Image (cartoon, rainbow, N blue to C red):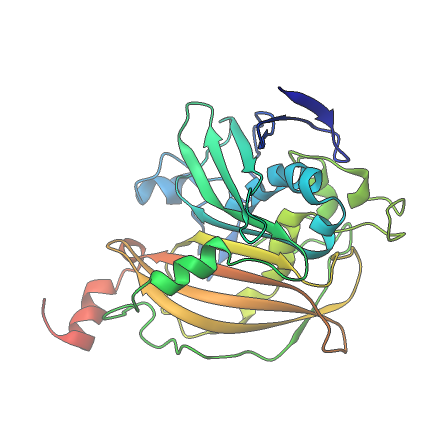
């Protein structure tokens, strides 16, 4: 039996035998002019094509918005106060393509819900888990991290030390605040293009009496000021999000609320094409030790985008 319902987010979802399906959506590109380390990013068409992509990619956490109605349908307000979405990005999405979010309710309460996203042609875009509540099962990225081997012969990340921690830095997200060179748009501008609109993102008419930050914009907030933080990576080089987890611990995250962010390098891994730095960012209520949310991010840097890769490799490890 199919159950068509309108959720708090205003979109129609379907549920059949425990499988929730969102509608097909066309996420929009908002990072075409993104810059970091003084150069364009993977979201710029020309830069992306030089690295073998069809064009500028849609940023991964943009897709998290399509899971918000599904998570809310399963867990209600708990999803917005203690929800966790944990995903491995498997394929890029380009502007104009349609994608759909799926969530399978767990039959075992000790397990997280399985989530994934597909392009209209069936190509899998991401896969992971979702959960909510104070006590949660192992997430997709916790499981993934436990299975990875440490990066051998790092070059771009040769000077990065696992365990490095940063001092807390202030951060907030006002409605019309441009979030920096890495995110050259405001929350108001995002809400004009977000795939799953909600009045809760801009109105005080919410259970908490104030607007909340959308799941995908929590990612933007967590990255606020990252271009001013030196964790030791060599560059300039182009990176992309390969894995990402956003976990609300004592949420929601509120618009115009002062926060502080601290970051820690958790792990270094790699693949044939990339070197990956796994960083956990923790969001604190300003001036306190109360943890509001955390983000685990695998920024995978493309070896081919670092001009000195072969030279540095030879200097570090000798000729291949």
Answer yes or no: is residue 180 visible. no
Answer yes or no: is residue 240 visible. yes
From this viewpoint, which residue is outermost toward the left? 319
Residue 306 falls in image quadrant: bottom left
What residue is shown at x 38% (from left), y 64% (from top)? 146
- Residue 104 in the figure: left or right of residue 260: left
Front residue of this view, candidates 108 and 167 = 108
Q: How many marks?
A: 0
What residue is shown at x 61% (from left), y 61% (from top)? 222
Quarter of the image for the N terminus: give it: top right
Quarter of the image for the C terminus: give it: bottom left
What residue is shown at x 69% (from left), y 49% (from top)? 79
Location of residue 279 in the rendering, given as x and y in whole percent from the top left corner: 48, 67
Location of residue 51 in the rendering, given as x and y in whole percent from the top left corner: 31, 45
What residue is shown at x 38% (from left), y 75% (from top)? 160
Front residue of this view, candidates 180 and 164 = 164
- In the image, residue 158 above or below residue 298: below
């Amino acid at each position: 039996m199919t159950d068509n319902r309108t959720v708090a987010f205003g979109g129609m979802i379907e549920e059949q035998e425990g499988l929730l399906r969102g509608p097909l959506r066309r996420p929009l590109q908002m990072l075409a002019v993104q810059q970091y380390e003084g150069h364009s990013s993977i979201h710029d068409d020309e830069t992306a094509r030089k690295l073998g992509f069809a064009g500028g990619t849609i940023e991964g956490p943009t897709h998290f918005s399509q899971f918000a109605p599904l998570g809310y349908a399963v867990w209600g307000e708990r999803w917005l106060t203690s929800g966790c979405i944990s995903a491995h990005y498997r394929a890029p999405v380009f502007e104009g393509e349609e994608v759909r979010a799926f969530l399978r309710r767990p039959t075992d309460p000790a397990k997280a819900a399985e989530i994934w996203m597909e392009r209209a042609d069936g190509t899998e875009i991401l896969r992971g888990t979702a959960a909510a509540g104070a006590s949660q099962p192992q997430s997709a990225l916790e499981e993934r991290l436990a299975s990875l081997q440490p990066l051998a012969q790092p070059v771009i990340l040769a000077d990065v030390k696992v365990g490095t921690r940063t001092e807390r830095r202030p951060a907030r997200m006002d409605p019309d605040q441009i979030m920096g060179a890495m995110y050259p748009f405001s929350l108001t501008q995002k809400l004009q293009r977000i795939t799953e609109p909600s009045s809760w993102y801009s109105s005080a008419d919410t259970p908490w009496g104030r607007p909340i930050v959308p799941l995908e914009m929590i990612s933007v907030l967590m990255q606020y000021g990252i271009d001013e933080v030196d964790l030791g990576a060599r560059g300039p080089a182009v990176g992309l999000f390969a894995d990402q987890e956003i976990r609300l611990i004592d949420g929601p995250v509120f618009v115009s609320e002062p926060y502080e962010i601290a970051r820690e390098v958790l792990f270094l891994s790699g693949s044939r094409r990339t070197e990956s730095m796994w960083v956990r960012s923790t969001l604190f209520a300003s001036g306190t030790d109360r943890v509001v949310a955390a983000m685990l991010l695998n920024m995978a840097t493309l070896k081919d985008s670092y001009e000195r890769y072969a030279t540095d490799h030879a200097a570090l490890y000798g000729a291949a």
